[in-house]
Amino acid sequence: MVSVEQLDGGLIEVTARLPRLAAAAVPGQFAQLRCGDHGGPLLRRPFSVAWTESQTCSFVFEVVGEGTRLLAELTAGDVLDSLGPLGRGFSVDAARGEVVCVSGGLGCAPFPLLVRSLRSRGVRDIIVLNGAASAERLYPADRFTRGDAGVGVVEATDDGSRGHHGFVTELLAPMVSSVTAVYACGPNAMLAAVATQVTGAGSPRVAEASLEAPMGCGFGTCLGCALPLRGDGRGPLWGLCCSDGPVLPLRSVDWAALLALPAADVA
Amino acid sequence: MVSVEQLDGGLIEVTARLPRLAAAAVPGQFAQLRCGDHGGPLLRRPFSVAWTESQTCSFVFEVVGEGTRLLAELTAGDVLDSLGPLGRGFSVDAARGEVVCVSGGLGCAPFPLLVRSLRSRGVRDIIVLNGAASAERLYPADRFTRGDAGVGVVEATDDGSRGHHGFVTELLAPMVSSVTAVYACGPNAMLAAVATQVTGAGSPRVAEASLEAPMGCGFGTCLGCALPLRGDGRGPLWGLCCSDGPVLPLRSVDWAALLALPAADVA
Amino acid sequence: MSSAGLRVDLGRGLVLPNPVGLASGTAGYGFELAQLIDLDRLGALYTKGTTRLPREGNPPPRVAETERGMLNSIGLHNPGVDWVAEHYAPLFAAWRIPVVVNVAGAEISDYMHCARHLDGVEGVAGVELNISCPNIAHGLDFGRDAAGAARLVDAVRAVTGRHVMVKLSPNVTDIAAVARAVEGAGADSVSAVNTYVGMKIHRASGRPVLPQGTGGLSGPAIHPLALAAVAEVRAAVRIPVVAAGGIDDVATAFDFFAVGADAIQVGTASFADPTTALRVLDGLAERAAAGRIPARWGTTAVGSP
Amino acid sequence: MSSAGLRVDLGRGLVLPNPVGLASGTAGYGFELAQLIDLDRLGALYTKGTTRLPREGNPPPRVAETERGMLNSIGLHNPGVDWVAEHYAPLFAAWRIPVVVNVAGAEISDYMHCARHLDGVEGVAGVELNISCPNIAHGLDFGRDAAGAARLVDAVRAVTGRHVMVKLSPNVTDIAAVARAVEGAGADSVSAVNTYVGMKIHRASGRPVLPQGTGGLSGPAIHPLALAAVAEVRAAVRIPVVAAGGIDDVATAFDFFAVGADAIQVGTASFADPTTALRVLDGLAERAAAGRIPARWGTTAVGSP
Ligand SMILES: Cc1cc2nc3c(=O)[nH]c(=O)nc-3n(C[C@H](O)[C@H](O)[C@H](O)COP(=O)(O)OP(=O)(O)OC[C@H]3O[C@@H](n4cnc5c(N)ncnc54)[C@H](O)[C@@H]3O)c2cc1C
Ligand SMILES: Cc1cc2nc3c(=O)[nH]c(=O)nc-3n(C[C@H](O)[C@H](O)[C@H](O)COP(=O)(O)OP(=O)(O)OC[C@H]3O[C@@H](n4cnc5c(N)ncnc54)[C@H](O)[C@@H]3O)c2cc1C
Ligand SMILES: Cc1cc2nc3c(=O)[nH]c(=O)nc-3n(C[C@H](O)[C@H](O)[C@H](O)COP(=O)(O)O)c2cc1C
Ligand SMILES: Cc1cc2nc3c(=O)[nH]c(=O)nc-3n(C[C@H](O)[C@H](O)[C@H](O)COP(=O)(O)O)c2cc1C
Ligand code: FES
Ligand code: FES
């Protein structure tokens, strides 16, 4: 039971009847989706839970390889096989007053759900800083706000085709001292840039990012999804993206080591 | 460009736009069909050309494994990737007057095309002896005759649910001496039974069968599709089903050796 | 589905309630999977490869997918044998599923150390000597040399009364020779196969995806290779043979019983579907109930290939 | 697509117009494929394994499909070297594509006989010694033993002035040692890999599908294994390395150039699509035209794994 929506710029939003996942998922958690049936890839692919209704869950992605190609081919009536919710989500309890979400590209995925959750917990003002390569690749602002006046979206594009011309992280600096929480999701370079802005004195109490790593299982048994965490100075300590994360405090990640790793894609 | 017709008893007839195959195929030849796309089986599957129109070819099969399951899933608009025509077909030149076709189960596949070809070459009477396990698994008689009064179909079923109760080969005995050609296709045991009826004196000049073997390529390069041919007495000589056959003179096959081989299916 | 009557006695105290186990490195130490499935119904849990000292493992990427297979280069990321004996074993002791600790090392003394520390520890049903890990320096030496493997087993045999299973490497010219050697040295059983050395290239850079260059290939792609290897091992030794390699349903598991395996391990398939081993077990129980499992899981005579 | 500038000189007179060849046993002696594709555009045809005397081959089934792979047990069905030299070579001589005759045997004298009979025969561009056929008795002995392989190459070297390529078996503990040994004995190049020993079980009977029990696994399933093997061979020898194993498009072919192969062979993929090798060649020519092929096909330094 699936519906597939093609957004501008190649973004795709798939909504499927997954009542148990919908009931259990907290913002920032992900599901392992099977792509294709027997002939499809051996391993599942991880996707953030982008939205839930009582019976359904939505995921946002674009086609980057075989798995996402098969997901994009789903049609109404197909069954989506999902395992989850998995991993640790965002800390929402300490957020108060104003918070900011920083999204880069497909990093938008966890934020609609996070925004709803924060608002339902009484967070007054939420600013979503949403960046992408170009205007048509921006996830639509109203999918973050869902008509809620307490949520604002500020956009940035690398090519200046909409909103701020430049990196989305450039929009963060002026607000970093006034918010109680920063949540980020996007490319590693963007996350590292966010991390440098939230490590000084007067930084927000909550500063977290959702990270990615190639996954074997998604539930902590294969030890495949290692991410470099800050160690004791003798090199990084490997944490697991799927079970220590995917959401991690920005200060616990060894950003230099992370940026030095080969790209996660294998194309 | 495909149409798929579900017949009774699990038989399926697929018709696809394959103009070059349609133009070139002679009765008894086969095509190597790709089943599914990238995720499907590595190797193609061989199917007899059952019927041709100027632009299309038809194939008859039932679902026995992964490849045929994927073929059965084809829907209108899908492309059928075919390699062929391949192999040697039936000898039609020497046939005159009366001929008989003996079909067992899915052995029906090559006969509609053969019957049309024989009639167009002036063969007066064609009897198709069509056997199957039960009535609903019989390929419909009118697909052999296509309304042609010069073609008769006599049916046999193992369970007696239609026509002669027993083996189709039992119907052959009374006519074997009066026909100029016997063409057979079906399970090996049936073909062997036909072979014993056509080897004595007064046997028809043409006595041929279409055989099967697991195939790697279908065009003579892998040497995978070995069939035991009559050798010089020191054991069988291996011929290639795909290029020496699939149609072979009944007398050139080493039936004892063939029946001693493990079944071709690998389920 | 009842799994009574599926008991497998592998010798020296290692009795599996049924032949369906979870392969080393694909089920951690069981804690995560216990949240997802009823672990206690299974026949055995083979833990992540455990070493003398804790190990951080290799830098990522540690896994990469191939055609119907996956490469891994985890590098024996594990908390060390002391931690396992002190903190995990007491939890294992509360489970019904026998836990076999997979042990790895670089020197014979490493294996001896681990075996000694696990000997007599409640909750540890036996050790599986991983002499075949392709992802650490020297990790393959014992597995690739029959004499070396025999020396290793001999030394470990001297320090433990527990069941000693030896996990064979398929990356060898003559797996039967290694199997015979470890049997001769006192191994109670062998398991086969570990992963095959493989590589994947990152197309944009032309460099290997895994920083170590190579990794271990597992999954359906290796199933036919593992079958041939297990058949060869079965023909070479009398001790029980525990089979692994590309099992993803009851049919692929049964293929191993057909070549004479005594028990099986489900590996990579658990990643995509953590219930795979339970499905295999249910299928097995169904066949057993229908009388479709002859003595010793229907061993057929398969000549040494 | 032009393929000018793709010439590969493998030494001792074996010059390939381009690096894309058809692997032994997957193109027969070329005659059937010549009906289906423009064979003369390709870089080399490696013939079916050819023996001293004609061979009938193994009883069927000879092929069986596995997950993204196939097993074969053809058993060197071939007309014998005399027939090839007398009847086929004159036809080869009329082709532009260099034809390398793949030679197999049970004894050193068999190989010597074949090499001698093919030496100086017009139309035969070289011999590829198949020391690694898993489908005949003794067929693996030379390929699995570095010293034996060296003796074989040494003996063949003495009776032919033609290019001698040695086809390595991957079913060994140390493929680099075998490669070094044959290089030392005078091989002009090596090709790797031949098929991996595998098995498939007929589910209804529980018996192997292939009457010999095992067969050789080829196709996409082995691609990651072949990449690791070729990388290891590349690091071990200085002579040219011709790579095979699971190539089914230009990307999978390029993976081998990334690990330092000088040329490639397309095998199993030709069965499903006889135009595969031409597609690979076109893709290669396109990349070459775009300057995306550095010297020696973009060899990157891949450490011995
Ligand atoms: C926790 C988590 C949440 C994610 N959420 C989303 C999301 O909501 N929307 C979205 O579009 N993408 C998300 N991703 C990335 C997404 O999983 C990859 O884009 C996807 O796996 C690519 O699969 P493919 O088969 O199409 O690509 P291929 O490149 O063909 O995949 C090949 C292999 O590489 C791995 N891989 C490729 N890219 C990545 C990546 N970026 N991260 C991890 N592994 C990768 C795949 O898992 C697979 O094993 C998330 C990743 C993680 C770890
Ligand atoms: C020349 C020729 C013509 C044929 N024509 C027809 C036809 O018109 N209609 C029809 O229904 N069937 C026909 N067959 C049989 C058909 O090819 C098989 O039923 C089909 O390959 C099964 O594929 P699968 O993937 O569904 O089955 P699986 O059993 O999953 O196939 C697994 C493997 O076994 C091989 N295999 C299984 N059964 C056979 C068989 N009977 N013969 C050869 N190989 C087999 C397959 O090729 C494949 O490699 C023909 C076979 C040959 C050789
Ligand atoms: C991610 C991963 C980690 C593994 N780690 C170990 C290990 O630590 N020790 C070991 O003996 N085998 C290890 N293996 C090998 C498996 O136990 C098993 O032998 C192999 O994967 C083949 O089975 P499969 O194809 O079902 O996965 C590992 C396999 C995988 C996929
Ligand atoms: C049906 C078949 C027959 C083969 N026969 C031979 C042979 O006679 N001599 C040889 O050296 N290799 C033989 N091979 C091995 C191939 O040449 C090649 O090394 C192997 O198949 C790996 O490449 P691939 O995965 O692209 O098929 C054969 C392979 C197949 C599939
Ligand atoms: S993906 Fe397996 S441990 Fe994280
Ligand atoms: S199927 Fe390959 S030679 Fe006949």
Image (tube, coloured by chain):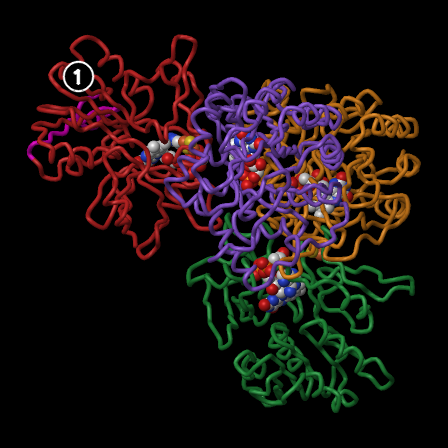
Chain colours: A red, B green, C purple, D orange
- The x, y position of residue B264, in whole percent, is 67, 62
The residue lying toward the viewer, choosing from A9 and C238, is C238
- The x, y position of residue B117, in whole percent, is 65, 77
Image quadrant of ligand 1? top left
- The x, y position of residue C232, in whole percent, is 72, 43
Q: Which residue type carries mark 1?
A: Pro
Do we see residue D69 in this rendering?
Answer: yes
Name the secondary structure under disc 1: loop
The residue labelled by disc 1 is: A204
**Mark 1 closeness class: few <14, some 14–19, many ≥20 residues within 10 Å:** some
Residue A157 forms part of the magenta stretch: yes
Q: Quadrant of residue B49?
A: bottom right
Q: Is residue A119 above or below residue B48?
A: above
Q: Is mark 1 within 8 Å of ligand 1?
A: no
Q: Is residue B142 above or below residue C65?
A: below
- Residue depicted at 49% across the width and 36% down the height: C26
Give the position of the N terminus of chain A as an image quadrant: bottom left
* Protein chain holding label 1: A
- The x, y position of residue C69, in whole percent, is 54, 39
Do we see residue D283 in this rendering?
Answer: no
Q: Quadrant of residue B179?
A: bottom right
Residue C263 forms part of the magenta stretch: no
Question: On the picture, is B16 further left or further right than D107?
Answer: left
Q: Quadrant of residue D116?
A: top right
Q: Which residues are magenta?
A: A149-165
- Residue depicted at 56% across the width and 68% down the height: B61
